[in-house]
Image: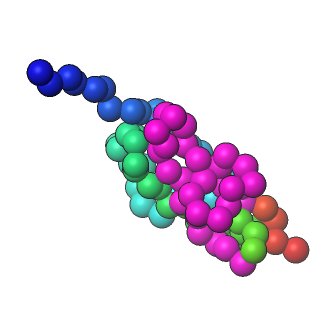
Amino acid sequence: MYLCHSAIDCGPAPILLDSIPLRGPSQETTFGVHLGYKCVNGYWFGRNRYTEVATCTATGLWEAAGETKLSKMPVCIRKL
């Protein structure tokens, strides 16, 4: 017997203030999808990082990937 499982969907791609997506708007919003972002001029993610990735997790939420785990999502901050 086979059981069907519905795909985990995180919903629309997150909009990050002061950033632009590295690719056009993604139609894929299911578990495991990675979306890249770049901060606009004068902003960065901190720690010398100008790009960051958001990942659709198994919980159905978008979260920061990699080292930027200070918040659930990456945040562009003004570079001084």
Q: Which residues are magenta?
A: 48-76
User: Which residue shows up at 47% across the image and 44% down it?
Assistant: 56
| Magenta-colored segment: predominant secondary structure | loop
Q: Position of residue 51 (x, y in %)?
A: 59, 69
80, above or below 16, in the image: below
Residue farthest to the front, as pictured: 1
Furthest-bottom residue in this view: 48
Give residue 55's position: percent from left, percent from top: 50, 50
The residue closer to the viewer here, 68 or 78, is: 68
Compared with residue 51, is residue 20 higher up or lower down, i.e. above or below? above
Q: Is residue 6 above or below residue 41?
A: above
Q: Is residue 70 visible?
A: yes
Report the front residue among 14 and 72. Answer: 72
Across and down, in percent, residue 50 comes to: 64, 72
34 on left or right of 46:
left
Q: Nearer the viewer, residue 58 or 78?
A: 58
63 left or right, relative to 80: left
Q: Is residue 42 visible?
A: no
Residue occupying image coordinates x 50% and y 61%: 36
